[in-house]
DNA sequence: TTATTTATGTTATATAAATCACATAAACTC
DNA sequence: GAGTTTATGTGATTTATATAACATAAATAA
């Protein structure tokens, strides 16, 4: 299908915008609206849709309801998206309690750690010992994990996970991991993002263009 | 200079790799080494360097020491990079204590919140009332803030910050903000990153290529 | 010292991604 | 219902980004 790597990210953004428009009582949306909201050109919006056979009306734009539910299926948002958090330090625990996740249908089902002090199997979202990770993800069919372990533990943890049904991780350690064969890594490198921001502020020629949206 | 938007990110990655190579006792590095580590072609590594007049030896590669210190200047890593955290909920506090930041020379100098229960002006990293933000950033010449406030507060906070010396933010709320004139926004959208990972795992044609590095 | 190797620096080429532009069809107007 | 408007859907074009290719110079070897 010649899928541009950024398309899916944009579809997700369009969807979020439309969900908010819907809350405002709006029924239709035009490519111009989404273009403004997401910061791209209207033709790109239309092309993105057309690429996935999401069609509108030659004059009346797109029906929000229709488009959102089609996007839900397309993006897999019609299914429960279960994740586990590996490493329950401050950051891991923050993610476990992060209310942005349930709001978009992402459910954190358990945390894992090696430190006995943080374990709590009876909590609403249990924190279990890391040695139970393989059993748990297998039993609960977990395909995605967030990695919030210390940097030196990251690679080992990935190696462990590769032997399970987990097919991808969000890595919060500043060591960027590479994706491989059937195992995807998305790096959330906060350190790098801040470094980059500093650079753009202090050195980048101040062209009035955006940096990202 | 026709600066590709991704170049700086890559330079930062090269730098991190070289710092680790240096710890291993290595002295020289070749474009092939960095290409492998970062997941790009060797010619791109050389082009990135040449774009900033970072030169090596026609045969002997690049001297790590030399290159790292030049990159430090170029990326502004020779200066202290001070940031404040706005919103000291679980996530904000996790960032305040995150040891990945000091390791790369990023110093969290204060947190801000409106909830009296979390304020603590005497802590090593003080948590102050949000009403003091303008004074503080002015007095301490802060140009970068991390935004970990609830989604409904984000836009208002940005509007406040725009009137100060803060020139950019890392936004952790799932609402993607746009950069404008002299105010840069980098969005860390964890929700979207996870959604995207789910999509790639469940729907993407399993081409053995990477997704990112 | 001359020949050979090898990794850089840079130009030419290929690939990817976004925008432009316009023909088309649905909805409005008179 | 014929004419006009307007927003889609898509092929052509532009721009951005990365790779490939190679001439060049430093290092080694003979």
Image (tube, coloured by chain):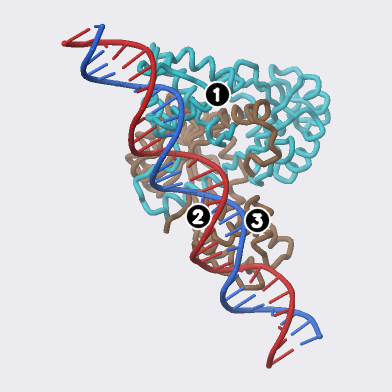
Chain colours: A brown, B cyan, C blue, D red
In the rendered structure, the residue with mark 1 lies on which chain?
A: B
Q: Position of residue B184 (x, y in %)?
A: 69, 36
| Disc 1 residue crowd, few under 14, some 14–19, many 20+, Cα 10 Å | some
Q: Nearer the viewer, residue A91 or B117?
A: A91
Q: Identify the disc placed on residue A205.
A: none
**Can you give x and y, in whole percent of width and height, for residue D15 in the image?**
57, 46
Residue occupying image coordinates x 63% and y 52%: A40
Foreground mark, 1 or 2?
1
Which disc, if any, is residue A80?
2
Distance, label 3 to label 1, CA atoms, is 36 Å
The front one of A27 and B48 is: B48
The residue that label 3 is drawn on is: A35
Residue drawn at (48%, 42%) of the image? A84
Task: Describe the element under mark 2 as helix, strand or loop.
Answer: loop
Residue B100 - label: 1
| Quarter location, residue B95 | top right
Regarding residue A136, the answer to whether it shows in the image is no
In the picture, measured across the screen, residue A27 lies left or right of residue B74, that is right
Q: Position of residue A194 (x, y in %)?
A: 61, 29
Q: CA distance from mark 1 to mark 2?
A: 32 Å
Q: Is residue B11 above or below residue A7?
A: above
Quarter of the image where the N terminus of chain B is located = top right
Chain ID for label 3? Answer: A
Q: Callout 3: 10 Å neighbours few (<14), some, many (20+)?
A: some
């Amino acid at each position: 299908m010649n899928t541009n790597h950024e398309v899916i990210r944009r579809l997700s953004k369009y969807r979020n915008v439309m969900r908010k428009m819907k809350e405002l009582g709006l029924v239709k949306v035009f490519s111009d609206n989404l273009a403004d909201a997401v910061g791209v050109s209207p033709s790109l919006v239309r092309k993105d849709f057309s690429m996935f056979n999401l069609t509108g009306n030659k004059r009346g734009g797109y029906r929000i309801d229709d488009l959102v539910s089609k996007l839900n299926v397309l993006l897999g948002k019609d299914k429960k998206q279960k994740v586990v958090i590996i490493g329950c330090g401050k950051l891991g625990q923050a993610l476990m309690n992060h209310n942005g996740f349930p709001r978009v249908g992402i459910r954190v089902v358990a945390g894992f750690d090696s430190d006995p002090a943080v374990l709590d199997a009876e909590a609403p979202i249990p924190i279990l010992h890391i040695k139970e990770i393989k059993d748990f993800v297998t039993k609960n069919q977990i395909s995605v994990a967030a990695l919030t372990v210390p940097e030196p533990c990251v690679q080992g943890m990935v190696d462990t996970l590769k032997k399970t049904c987990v097919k991808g991780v969000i890595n919060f350690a500043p060591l960027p991991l590479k994706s491989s064969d059937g195992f995807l890594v998305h790096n959330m490198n906060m350190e790098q993002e801040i470094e980059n921001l500093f650079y753009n502020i202090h050195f980048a020629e101040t062209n009035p263009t955006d940096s990202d949206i």
